[in-house]
Amino acid sequence: MAAFIFFVTLFMLMASTPRADAAQISAAALLLRVDQLGKGDYEKIQDAIDAVPSDNRKVVFILVEPGIYNEKIAVPADKPFITLSGSKPNGTIITGSDSGNIFESATFTMLASDFVGRYLTIQDTLLDDTGRHYYNNCYIEGAVDFIFGNSTSLFERCYLHTLSEGGASIIAQRRESPSEKTGFIFQGCKITGVKTIVLGRPWGPYSKVIFALTYMSSVILP
């Protein structure tokens, strides 16, 4: 029980990174706006991420206007301190359908630390592999292992929806050593699906995933 409390406390401290609100926008060292209609700094999300300097050490706020963004997003390890935010729930949709190598097929790949994602809809797969991340009010949808990796991440008030026809898992966490301070926490979330599915599978020998105060529909197998 003590270990559980410590782990939750660790994630709550991590989540104290400033969120995507007016105060953070005004404090951002770099503010970028993405708009498919050409009314922002960039029309593609990846172009805005690419504009962040390598070895970045300042807060970057990227506001993404509503729309369906059919592109693969990757935030490399040398670009920490990025907040990527939609302007309203369910308004910013990032979608992809690549197949093949598990690391290359993800719609959204997160390798940088101190990342905050808010009001994002991610369709297909989220590779959440390294660093500390905080996801708030996001909708994540996919079929098999659509949240996977070995980061230290808190998902708060997020909605997970599986499209699997049955027998698959939602999460694959890859913690490989008991000394690694990694894992996923889902707090105050909601999980639904099309057919029966299991919550997750151990991708590593010491995989760690915690669900707290989370609604799970009847499609989740006990």
Image: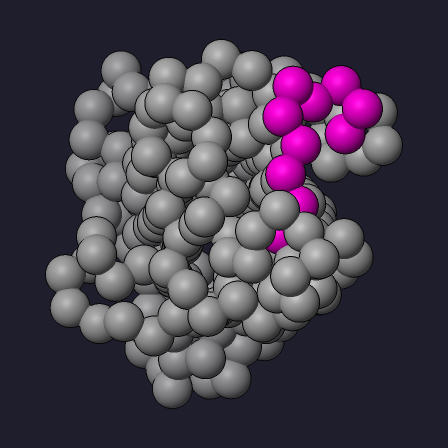
Residue 128 spot, x, y in % from top left: 38, 43
In the rendered structure, the answer to whether residue 81 lies left or right of residue 139 reads left
**Residue 45 vs residue 105, the one in the foreground:** 45
Residue 32 is covered by the magenta coloring: yes
Rendered view: 158 above or below 167:
above
Residue 191 is covered by the magenta coloring: no
Give the residue drawn at x 66%, y 67%. Answer: 37
Give the residue drawn at x 45%, y 18%. Answer: 56
In the rendered structure, the answer to whether residue 197 lies left or right of residue 62 reads left
Outermost right residue: 22
Q: Splitting the image into 4 quarters, where does residue 131 fall?
A: top left
Rendered view: 209 above or below 53:
below
Question: Coloring scheme of the render?
Answer: one colour
Residue 33 spot, x, y in % from top left: 66, 45
Rendered view: 166 above or below 189:
below
In the rendered structure, the answer to whether residue 191 lies left or right of residue 209 reads right
Q: Is residue 82 visible?
A: yes
**Residue 98 vs residue 165, the one in the foreground:** 98
Residues in magenta, as a range: 25-34
**Residue 17 vs residue 163, the one in the foreground:** 17
Q: Splitting the image into 4 quarters, where does residue 175 fall?
A: top left
Give the residue drawn at x 20%, y 24%. Answer: 177
In the rendered structure, the answer to whether residue 178 lies left or right of residue 82 reads left
Q: Splitting the image into 4 quarters, where does residue 186 fall?
A: top right
Give the residue drawn at x 36%, y 23%. Answer: 54
| Quarter of the image that includes the N terminus | top right
